[in-house]
Amino acid sequence: MLNENKVKMMTKMAIYEKNEGKRMLKMSRYYKGDFVTLGVLKSIIASTFAFAVIVIFFALCNMEKIVSEVNTMDYTLIAKKVGIYYILFLIVFSIIGGIVNAYQYNKSRAGLKKYFSRLNKLERFYNNQNKKRNS
Amino acid sequence: MEFLLELKENIRRIYSRFDKIIVPAIRFFIALVSFLMLNSNIGYMAKIKSPLIAIILSIVCAFLPSWFTILILTIFMILHLYAISIEFTIVALCVILVMYLMFFRFSSKYGYLLIATVLLCWIKIPAAIPVVAALGFGMVTIVPVAFGVVIFNIIETASQYEAAITNASASDSVQQISYIAESFMSNKSVIVMVAAFSVTIIVVNCIKRLSINNSWLYAIIAGTVVELLFLIIGILAFDAKINILVTVLGAVLGVIVGYICKMLLFNVDFKRTEFVQYEDDEYYYYVKAVPKITIANTDVKVKQINARKTKKSSKTTDSYSDVTNDDDDDYIV
């Protein structure tokens, strides 16, 4: 027999899973610390690529100067400068990535709480049904 | 006010009934206008300039998420830029790649806000967007709005590129890249606009969160004033090429649109008809869940309860009493 309340509950959960829950349920697999670390890691990788693009772009813009001074340039100093900028760049964007991920994780909690409370209700419903059948 | 509230209810009712048509139609319209805007501004590649291609691509975009529309529009733009010059394509790709890697991946779901910013820049009233964006979607909208301004700058520079490059007599590729990069960086109006819009979004966000009555109304007013101040200071201090009259017009439009959006669209629970499939031990379920229409009740009876009477069990009757425990009655299943 179909139980109307059960169908309603399962439908709500399915709608949540289909929409915003899709991403949030993925998040719920992680502890907050792990999720934030993952976000920082992704930011580091993305920032490294972005920094490489910026360096190439900068080099292309100043190609004339670079070609004319190719023999007289102090490469150690340039490498040091680029290294310092890279580290600063990484720090700034890792912090941004960390903050954004922490915020997203906290935001997902409210929806998940409702979802899990429905899951618990459903479990209780099944337990009751099993008890009735056994007795 | 009553009229606006009724209209709000009607919009919600129409949306929940025809969302399967309304959403793709709006997406189609936005995508089509964007493609046509790109064609008219930088339509240098004859093969893809045909309106038929724009229509076909818009139909595809209508049924896919916003990030896909952004991707297709970016590819479309890059192809047109490629027809102008390879150097311009390299510079534009670098800018887009850096912006995507650093910022846009955090707020990719606001793709349509980016498109709206570009389109409003095109019709010269970008000042209308930050207040509305901040009011509806929060602080994160700084990214798509700023990105939109930069993208429009690329489009605008590209549309004037051929004449500019001849005047600058930059013959080889390296010179051209330096010239393009310089013309991007030296465009003060972009910097002024990005700064002004970012500050406006922050101000609107901070004020609308204050726990005072009508905070959002104060947020609209304060945001617009700050925006205008920043833009005018920017125009005067950096000699940015922004038309003051059009800016003021845009800001006033922002106030009106912000007010209307706040009354009609934001904070309304737009539930859609949902089709879901799931199963349990006994059945497979293919469910169509239609949101219930709640008509604003004008005849709610408020029963006053005296302190003495509360000792006895007293009940209040209102029309919402049947929706108290959990929200299990939102849909007709």
Image (cartoon, coloured by chain):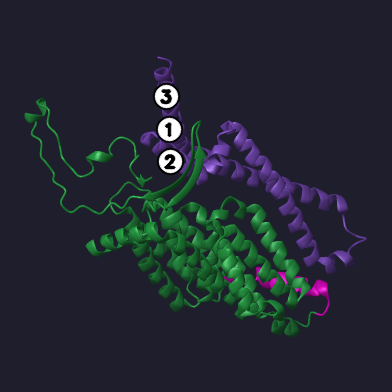
Chain colours: A purple, B green
Q: Hey, which residue is sitting farthest top in the picture?
A: A135
Q: Residue at x 64, y 80 (%)?
A: B50
Which amino acid type corresponds to the residue marked 1 in the rendered image? Answer: Arg
Residue at image position (18%, 43%) is B318
Answer yes or no: do the residues labelled 2 and 1 have beta carbons within 8 Å? yes
Where does residue B251 sit, x and y in percent of width and height? Answer: 41, 69
User: Which amino acid lies under the numbered mark 3 shown in the image of this protein?
Assistant: Arg
Disc assigned to residue A124: 3
As drawn, the label of residue A31 is none
Give the extent of the magenta segment: B171-189
Q: Earlier in the sequence, mark 2 or mark 1?
A: 2
Nearer-N-terminus badge (2/3): 2
Q: Which residue is mark 1?
A: A118
- Give B231 or B313, whichever is nearer the viewer: B313
Taking depth in this image into account, of A52 and B263 the one nearest to the observer is B263
* Badge 1: chain ID: A
User: Label 2, on which residue?
Assistant: A12
Question: Decide: marks 2, 3 in contact (CB < 8 A)?
Answer: no
**B280 shown above or below A69:** above
Residue at mark 3 shares a chain with residue at mark 1: yes
Check if residue B143 falls in the magenta segment: no
Helix, strand or loop for the magenta stretch, by majority:
helix
Q: Are marks 2 and 3 on the same chain?
A: yes
Of badges 3 and 1, the one in the foreground is 3
Q: Secondary structure at mark 3?
A: helix
